[in-house]
Amino acid sequence: MKSNNLWLLAILLLMLTSPAYALRCGSKIVDTGDSKARIQRICGAPSETFSRYVLRSPDQIRNRKLRKRILNAARSSRQKKFEIRIDEWIYHFSGRKKSKRIIFEEGVVVDVRDAD
């Protein structure tokens, strides 16, 4: 009976934890699909920002809505690659919390990773 309770506790803890890549700002969690406006609202201004444009084929685009829009555009043209805006926001935290890098494609979070 005791081992059943331990398994139940372990499963509950896994359900309550956020993904390893997630960034917590206060009580809110930043995750893929979030907009720049939401990130700015819950996390405040980033410590550093970088922007660039890259050429990508539709299968290289991680933002699902953008990929669908690009695929529709690709059907009506002969264009194979499309210019996508990539923004990177870096948040530096005091104490033991690691710096985090949020990567956006056309204003939507596609990745959250350690900035180190």
Image (cartoon, rainbow, N blue to C red):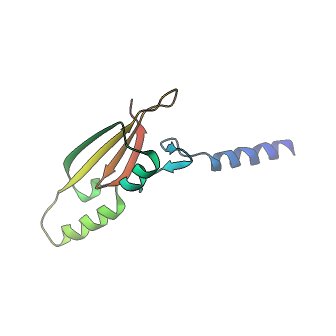
Q: In the displayed structure, would residue 72 be above or below residue 66? A: below
Q: What percent of the width, then of the height, locates residue 85? A: 23, 52
Q: In the displayed structure, would residue 18 be above or below residue 93? A: below
Q: What percent of the width, then of the height, locates residue 14? A: 64, 46
Residue at 54% in and 44% down: 26
Q: Residue furthest left?
A: 78
Q: Classify residue 40 as left or right of residue 19.
A: left
Q: Quadrant of the C terminus?
A: top left
Residue at 43% in and 52% down: 41
Q: Nearer the viewer, residue 67 or 95?
A: 95
Q: What percent of the width, then of the height, locates residue 43? A: 45, 45
Residue at 29% in and 40% down: 49
Q: Nearer the viewer, residue 89 or 19?
A: 89
Quadrant of res 77: bottom left
Q: Residue furthest bottom?
A: 76
Q: In the displayed structure, would residue 42 be above or below residue 98? A: below
Q: Nearer the viewer, residue 30 or 43?
A: 43
Q: Classify residue 49 as left or right of residue 102.
A: left
Q: Nearer the viewer, residue 98 or 47?
A: 47
Q: In the displayed structure, would residue 105 be above or below residue 93? A: below
Q: What percent of the width, then of the height, locates residue 88? A: 31, 43
Q: How many marks?
A: 0
Quadrant of res 33: bottom left
Residue at 26% in and 48% down: 86
